[in-house]
Amino acid sequence: MKKKDFVLIASVALVAVAALGLSPLLEERDVSRVIVTVDGTEALNVPLAQDGVYDIPQADGAVNVIEVAGGGVRMVQANCRDGLCVQQGETRRAAKSIVCLPHRVVVRLAADEHEQAQTPLDGVDVVVR
Ligand SMILES: [Zn+2]
C-alpha cells in the first residue's frame, strides 16, 4: 500500500514537472514581435529575435530606452519620475508587459501573424553571447 502511494505521488510530481518545464517553451513560441506603444499609438515594432537597443523619444522630452536581447526585452533607461518601468525587468512572455505609466509607454510581446506558421526553430530561445 505504501509503495503504491509512493508511485502515485512520484508520477503526479513527474507530470507537474514536465508541465512546468514545457509551458515557458510553448509561451515563447507564441511571441516574435516587440511592440511599443506610446499613448496607444504604435511607436516601434521590431522582431524579438533581433537584438538591439531602441530609443523611444517623445515631444515633451520623455525618453524610454528599450533593449531587445536573447529573446527578451526590458526597459534599460527612462527619465520618468518613478523609474518603475526599469525596475520591472525583463519580459519574455505576451502575458507580461512592461509599462511606464508617467510616459504612457507600453512594451509588449506579440505573435507575428505572417511568420506564425514557420518552423519550430522560431520558438527556440537562442542566446547569442
Ligand atoms: Zn517609467
Image (tube, rainbow, N blue to C red):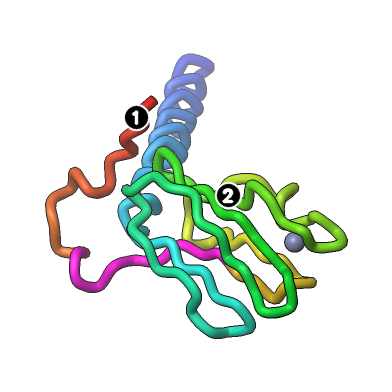
**Mark 1 sits near ligand 1, with its Cβ under 8 Å away:** no
Q: Reply above or below: 8 against 19.
A: above
Which element type, helix, strand or loop, lies under badge 2?
A: strand
User: What residue lies at 86% left-to-right and 59% top-to-bottom?
Assistant: 82
* Circle 2 residue: 74
* Circle 1 residue: 128
User: What residue lies at 58% left-to-right and 84% top-to-bottom?
Assistant: 40
Camera-nearest residue between 83 and 53: 53
Q: Few, some or many C-alpha atoms within 10 Å of disc 2 (few <14, some 14-19, many ≥20)?
A: many
* Magenta residue span: 107-115
Q: Amino acid at mark 2?
A: Arg
Direction from residue 129 to residue 124 in the image, left or right: left
In magenta stretch: residue 55: no
Direction from residue 65 to residue 109 in the image, left or right: left
Which corner quadrant of the figure contains ligand 1?
A: bottom right
Q: Quadrant of the image for the C terminus?
A: top left
Q: Residue furthest right?
A: 81
Q: Position of residue 31 (x, y in %)?
A: 36, 59
Q: Position of residue 115 (x, y in %)?
A: 19, 64
Q: How many numbered callouts?
A: 2
Q: Position of residue 72 (x, y in %)?
A: 47, 46
In magenta stretch: residue 111: yes
Question: Splitting the image into 4 quarters, where does residue 126 fall?
Answer: top left
Camera-nearest residue between 4 and 53: 53
Q: Residue furthest bottom?
A: 40
Tag 1 and tag 2, C-beta contact below 8 Å: no
Q: Reply above or below: 107 against 24.
A: below
Camera-nearest residue between 109 and 61: 61
Which element type, helix, strand or loop, lies under badge 1?
A: loop
